[in-house]
Amino acid sequence: MKAIGNLLIGILGIGMIFFVIYNLLGFSGKDYDNGTMFGGIIFGLLLIWISFKKDKKTTAENYVKKENITIPLWWKRLIGFVVDFVIILIIYSLFVSISAEIYNTRIDKIYNPLLLISPFIVFYYSLQEYLFNTSIGKMIFKLKVVSAKANGKPTFSQIIIRSLSRLIPIDIFFYLFKRPIGLHDIISKTVVIKKI
């Protein structure tokens, strides 16, 4: 199953690079900026690298194995993510509406909406996961974030790294592997477990 996941990720990476080359050569007739093209190549290369990466255990995976922890099913984390993301979108939409009323201009028309929503994502998760070890979406399934290094409450730096890592576009593809451990879990050395 993992081999099929790796193959699909590799094909996606190769497809991304071909898409960028196709557009750079002008065959599509669309004009993309250099940042988008550069990002597409980097994203494609990352996907290819992930597909060929050896089976090295991360700190989070070692912690799960050592403590014999049952990781929550991927669909529970997905539903939790969707709930959290809807809340973030509501907060972001309120911010855009209020700023439009105050400054008489739509800030999301001036700046890239993906860049504008990023601080909301980081703040939302950082605040909740540091104070409560969970988020509103995770509360539905009684899940919490623990440190894979200290077997307890994650440090503030772990939570910040975890929240910033969510902004990496390939984070979601890590759930295709044998355990539903995201890139943000691996980088921050944290694990999402069921509350006891």
Image: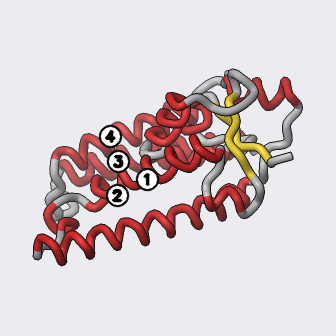
Q: Amino acid at mark 4?
A: Ile
Mark 3–mark 1 Cα distance, whole angstroms, equals: 31 Å
Please say if the residues under marks 2 and 1 sit with CB atoms less than 8 Å apart. yes
Residue type, mark 1 in image: Ile
Q: CA separation, marks 2 and 1?
A: 6 Å
Residue density around tag 1, few if under 14, some if 14–19, many if 20 or more, within 10 Å: many
Q: Nearer the viewer, mark 1 or mark 4?
A: 1
Residue designated by label 3: 18
Circle 4 is placed at which residue position?
A: 41
Q: Compare marks 1 and 4 and give the one earlier in the sequence.
A: 4
Secondary element at image label 4: helix
Q: Quadrant of the N terminus?
A: top right
Write down the quadrant of residue 54 in the picture: top right
Could you say where residue 177 lies in the image, as x and y percent from the top left?
Answer: 68, 42
Mark number, residue 121: 1
Label 1–label 4 contact, CB within 8 A? no
Q: Earlier in the sequence, mark 3 or mark 1?
A: 3
